[in-house]
Amino acid sequence: MRGSIRFIRVFGIDIDIHITFFLLLGIFFLFLGINGLILILGVFLFVTIHELCHGLAARYFGLRVTKITLLPIGGIASMSEMPTKPYQELIISLAGPLSNALIVIIFYFPLHALLGEETLMYPIRVLTGQAEHTGQFNVIAHIYWINLVLAVFNMIPAFPVDGGRVLRAILSYRMGRKAATQVAVRLGHIFALLFAYVGIVYGHIFLLLIAVFIYMAASGEGMQVEVSETIKNYFVHDILTREFVFISKDTPLSKALELIFHTHQEDFPVVEDGHLVGMLTRREVIQGLHERSKDTHAEVIMRTDIPPVSVKTNLDIVRKLMQKHNAGAIPVERNGKVVGVVTQGDINKVYMIAHK
Ligand SMILES: [Zn+2]
């Protein structure tokens, strides 16, 4: 994510911190001093544990979690692919809140013995408006209860928050993934509006931020599933055009630019003896023209990390490959020979025509 800083690597998962987190650290330090600082670091620690548990559960099912980004409002685990089987999503989604709930249970008695009832329960009394009871501020007690907040908040069925995912997984058993997602997204929107209302009325700017985030994230994921479920019934051979242009390794950028203008194609497989050696997409052409001369050969700037697909590949898999490799087009092969390209535009067109 933009504006994130690589922090640490645990269990092969990169943990990045979004710079706004430091802003929060500064604000809390300003208002609460050193206790504010410790409090935010506590949130940071437990959100990390929460996200790592999602990550480890995903890994158990063979799904790769590449990165965890820590934002002030929580963490986002980036997965190479989303779980599509309901029980996988159920367990992965529960793992995070469960880790926080376990921390609450495990540390309750030791902390109760250490701090005493009054001090340990003080943050809860503040939270529920019963602070007139005796007790005093203790930063450990506050950090400890953060786990309860994380566990409870994340179990609210406000998709795509964990609780919403759990709900979608359960609904998926009865009505299928697409319909289950639609229900979950609608519920996510309702909760977002509710949070926004409370945020505005009570002046909780943070809740307002969360509301905006949930609303947009719910819409985004809803759309993803909608697209996925629609295009998975189509295959590369359904849309592959017979005519396509390929280039060779020594094709200069100026020629590629010309081809973009004179053909209907913007992404070109780079071919040598009929075999694929790379891809030159519109993006590389534009970047190449900015950074190098127009005489630069295709092989210098072509991408070699975009894997080819076969004519029998499902379009949803093609779409996911494009996302994974951040590619606007994917080459198509039949019996080891290049036979065309599928672009993001082609996939969008299929969706537009096929969705109802
Ligand atoms: Zn979570």
Image (cartoon, rainbow, N blue to C red):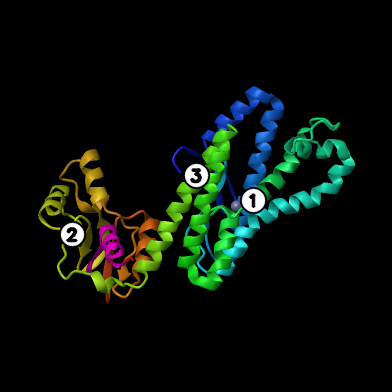
Q: Which mark is residue 213?
A: 3
Q: Quadrant of residue 122?
A: top right
Sequence-first tag of 1 and 2? 1
Q: Position of residue 277 (x, y in %)?
A: 27, 62
Residue 203 visible within the image: yes
Which residue is at 86% across, 31% downward?
Answer: 134
Near-viewer residue (128 or 287): 128
Q: Secondary structure at mark 1?
A: helix
Q: Position of residue 264 (x, y in %)?
A: 15, 58
Which residue is at 75% across, 42% downward?
Answer: 144
Viewer-nearest of discs 3 and 2: 3
Residue type beneath disc 1: His
Q: Position of residue 132 (x, y in %)?
A: 82, 30
Q: Is mark 1 within 8 Å of ligand 1?
A: yes
Q: Which mark is residue 248?
A: 2
Residue 343 among magenta residues = yes
Near-viewer residue (141 or 254): 141
Q: Position of residue 253 (x, y in %)?
A: 17, 48
The residue beneath circle 1 is 50
Q: Which mark is residue 247?
A: none
Viewer-nearest of discs 3 and 1: 3
Q: Specify whether 41 is left or right of 334.
A: right
Sequence-first tag of 3 and 1? 1
- Residue 327, above or below 44: below
Q: Secondary structure at mark 3?
A: helix
